[in-house]
Amino acid sequence: MKSRSLIVVVAVGAGLMLSGCDQIKKLAGGGGAPSGQVVATVDGEEITSMELRAELGNFGSRDPAVMKAAQQQALQRIILRKLLAHQAREEKLDKSPDYTIQVERGQETLLAQLYQRKLATKITQPTKQEAEAFVAANPARFADRKVMFVDQVIAAPNKIAPERLQPLTTLAQVKALLDAEGVQYQSNAVVLDTLSANPQLVEGVSKLPPGEIFVIPQGGALLFNHVEATRSVPFTGDMAVAYATNALRQQKGQETVAKQVEALRKAAETKIVYNDAYKPEPPKKKTPPGSGAATPNEAASGAAPAPPVPAPDVK
């Protein structure tokens, strides 16, 4: 009986020794080439297939060569990031106050995003009838959809008075004024698709006389736009309904999240205590429409509120 017990003990001890050796190899970066869920190691630190998928995000391709190239690019980004992070730790940058603040901010941002995403998943799927009603209620995006080819002049931030821009009717005149004032600018061309563009922008552009230039402020710069050509591309049938279903789902998700966040903020109001120097001003009373002078935004309502965005492929 004693000898049998001894054999068991020795066997268990051998198992512990083997697992210990494996752990040492792992920490030392040895143990052979990575396999299974481990796609690579960096100085013994594993990079898993889950990390690689997270790095790729929503990217996907049916072409194996394209997918392989994307995986390699993503993997090299992870490797470089780990090397830089390791070097930063060597130099004690992870002990700095800025690091602590940024980590906490990043964690809170991620948690907030995950919570909002969870809220959005609770919405009910739009029905086919709702999607069809959405298509009918938005003819500019569907039945009357148009694709506009827009020439642009993007002027650097400047102090040219608005009244000097008012009489300009062509992009050539815009360039001449900018040259005379020594303002740098860049020419560009974009496609504006009424299916996906900002509805307010589409409405504003549609009210302009043919060939009229419209100006969009953007981060201190000015975008001068001229619609060079317009093509009618109706979007109807089952594909339009499917697109509307997705648009409605996103819209409902945004509305659900906004309501939940607003309710959460109001419920927490009594728990928030401000330093007097940082206390927000009480909200101003809203002025009834038509009771006073127009605000700068209202006065500039003829201008589009957002720049044209690239459109999906038109076939």
Image (spheres, rainbow, N blue to C red):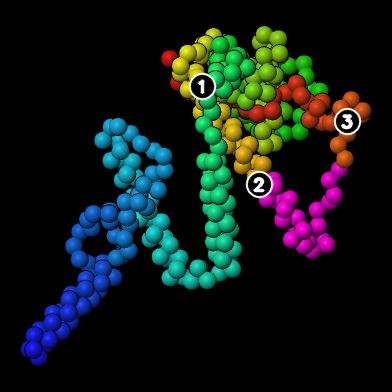
Number of the label disc, if any, that sits on residue 220: none
Q: Which residue occupies the extreme right position in the image?
A: 291
Front-most of residues 193 and 248? 248
Residues tagged 1 and 2 counted as in contact (Cβ below 8 A): no
Asked if residue 188 can be seen in this view, the reply is no
Q: Residue at x 56, y 66 (%)?
A: 100
Number of the label disc, if any, that sits on residue 288: 3
Quarter of the image with the C terminus is top left
Query: Which structural element holds mark 2?
Result: helix
Query: Which structural element holds mark 1?
Result: helix
Front-most of residues 30 and 11? 11
What are the residue bounds of the magenta stretch? 262-284
Q: Position of residue 260 (x, y in %)?
A: 65, 45
Relative height, residue 221 to residue 72 (above, below): above
Relative height, residue 271 to residue 69 (above, below): below
Relative height, residue 241 to residue 10 (above, below): above
Give the image quarter of residue 218. Answer: top right
